[in-house]
Amino acid sequence: MLEPTHQTTIESLTEAEAAEELARLAQEIAHHDAAYHTHDAPEITDADYDALRRRNAAIEVRFPELIRPDSPSSRVGGAPESGFAKIRHRVPMLSLDNVFDATEFAEFCTRAKRFLGRTEPLVFVAEPKIDGLSISLTYEHGHFVRGATRGDGTEGEDVTANLRTMKSVPDRLHGEAPAFIEIRGEVFLTKADFLALNQSQAEAGAKIFANPRNAAAGSLRQLDVKITAGRPLSLFAYAQGESSEPVATTHWDYLQRLKVWGFDVNPLSKRLGSEADAETFQSEIGLARSGLGYDIDGVVYKIDDLALQRRLGFVGRAPRWATAWKFPAEQATTVLRDIRIQVGRTGALTPVAELEPVNVGGVLVARATLHNEDEIARKDIRIGDTVVLQRAGDVIPQIVSVVTDRRSEGSTPYVFPDICPACGSHAVRPPGEVVKRCTGGLICPAQRVERLIHFVSRPAFDIDGLGEKTIQEFYNEGWLHGPADLFKLPEREAEIATREGWGKLSAANLSRAIRTRQTVPLERFIYALGIRRIGATNAKLLARHYGSFANWRTQMLAATQLGSDERLELGSISGIGPTIAEELTDFFGEARNIAALDELAAELTIQEAAKADAADSPIAGKTVVFTGTLETMTRPEAKSRAESLGAKVTDSVSKKTDIVVVGADAGSKARKAVELGVRTMTEAEWREHVG
């Protein structure tokens, strides 16, 4: 897997270029999620990882129609490890978006105010961001009953017995407490305890930990609870999951309640009266960082008012009411050994920089993606050059520049190949695009294998035991041609067991893993198909809107007809739009795709999309359009509220629309609703209708 990539500025990306980069980022981030959250063995620094996510998010903002089913913005962390029982979080343990300077923090504040429709300063609670392992503790009638790691955000590992050994985890809450409450925090090691632990590990000839975060995670996730008991783990509590009753009206008051209950809360946490106070606090903590007794990589800023937090809600994997302001990273110089060409599942040729390994902020970086031939030419990057790497901002690590005075005589500019290294077909660059693509199509093994790898990836079918090497091995054997063939592999279990590196147990495990995944949620199924621009977020939108595979398939086939109601409905789904609709109809307009789709579906049980918990909602299942200026809520807030009550929100009015909410200065949508006989409501009538 590559180290974090180097790319051109987002403003200069073409649509095709952006799509290719989002595909690479999804794969790369998923790899690093598993390394960090599942295996406690990160391969890059937090700064590198944050930059990858920020790059992904920034591209998605500019090209929302390209959001992939496996978008990192829709998932958190990695899957739980197999050594522990699993616990499903009642409220997902989501992650935070990041900012890196005052301008980005101001933009975060502006977005929150715009959503809320307010102009007055926001009150924040600032908490230093501990680099540890996130956990959730469940208390019933004041007693600690279970604890889990964050895992993939939805499901974590049951580490209850291990957590009971920690002195900072109260076995019983002091004073009054709700009948049920989930309390969240971070398990970590202080710098002094980390050094002492590594010294004792060295003396015992045991594993030396790379950093305090790895040591904390490894210590908590021990199958032998006695090992955990012998490790000096600490906990800072800072968040709440589900609760049977309200415990505070502000986050600051909640932190004070945590102290009363017996938890440690970061003593540097502070309530701030404005955005300006947050900037001052960030500077102060930055100066004090090196002298703290534990590692931090930034500060988390949360809007204090819990009612405002509920109104703001979440977007993708992150809350709108909180952000992590990260500290800046570093630069280093190294030598570019070679430029290697990779071929993606859509045939894109991507140049990869093979670097003389260099330590950048404590991480050994050996590779970076050069993105495309224009970027190589613009910076005149040549094999053998000494280059400057930087890990910060929206391109990390990026080759900032070439140290030309160290360039050897006889150096020549890099010539981008016009032949695919995987199949020997011509590589062409379509007019207006910056990405060269292999013309080999289905005959190119790189593309076919990459599509299968995407299909079994964690955000898609997530089939254990079917990694890149195994997919390539079975493809070379002639067993895999399309996704449906994956589910026929159990028929070859006896044959697989005789192969080198396999055995009866591993072959049986693979068969079991495949059969387990033959029941799949609709959103994962849609994402796994690898349709261009359909990332995890868009797959969820489609699944939620159409409900079942049969309905989605029928509606998509009908949508291939220009001017049809189904085509109009597809393009008007809030978050989809006409460009993504075109990709979908192109896919369903190809007979071979339909044949492959039906062959695959015949092997599966595709679950219907989960419906919003809106049993008593008067708008559950209704299609709603908002038009005009709303006075008591912003448009995003209105849409979010409607969706939470089980409605489908679209941007266009059609015969299938049930309700059009008409605000001030409404135009063509209101007129069309009247023409079609669609029910209209004023904003006041809408609020009374939904309660």
Image (cartoon, grey):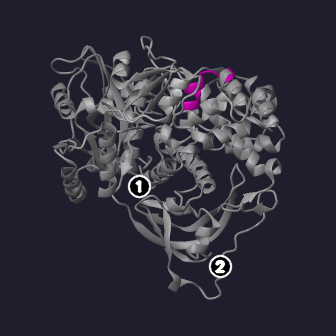
Say what secondary structure mark 1 lies in: helix
Does the segment drawn in magenta span residue 545?
yes
Q: Position of residue 207 (x, y in %)?
A: 45, 47
Does the segment drawn in magenta span residue 217?
no
Q: Position of residue 507 (x, y in %)?
A: 72, 30
Q: Position of residue 564 (x, y in %)?
A: 68, 30
The image quadrant of residue 271 is top left
Residue at the (83%, 49%) spot, across then down: 443
What kind of residue is marked 1?
Ala
Give the residues in magenta.
540-550
Q: Is residue 500 visible?
A: yes
Q: Position of residue 380 (x, y in %)?
A: 58, 77
Q: Label 1 to label 2, Cα distance in Å?
A: 31 Å
Residue at the (62%, 38%) spot, across then down: 457
Q: Is residue 177 left or right of residue 394?
A: left
> Which numbered marker is on residue 47?
1
Q: Is residue 466 left or right of residue 364?
A: right
What kind of residue is marked 2?
Pro
- All told, the count of numbered labels is 2
Circle 2 Cα neighbour tier, 10 Å, few/some/many (<14 / 14–19 / ≥20): few
Residue on which disc 2 sits: 413
Residue at the (41%, 55%) spot, across then down: 47
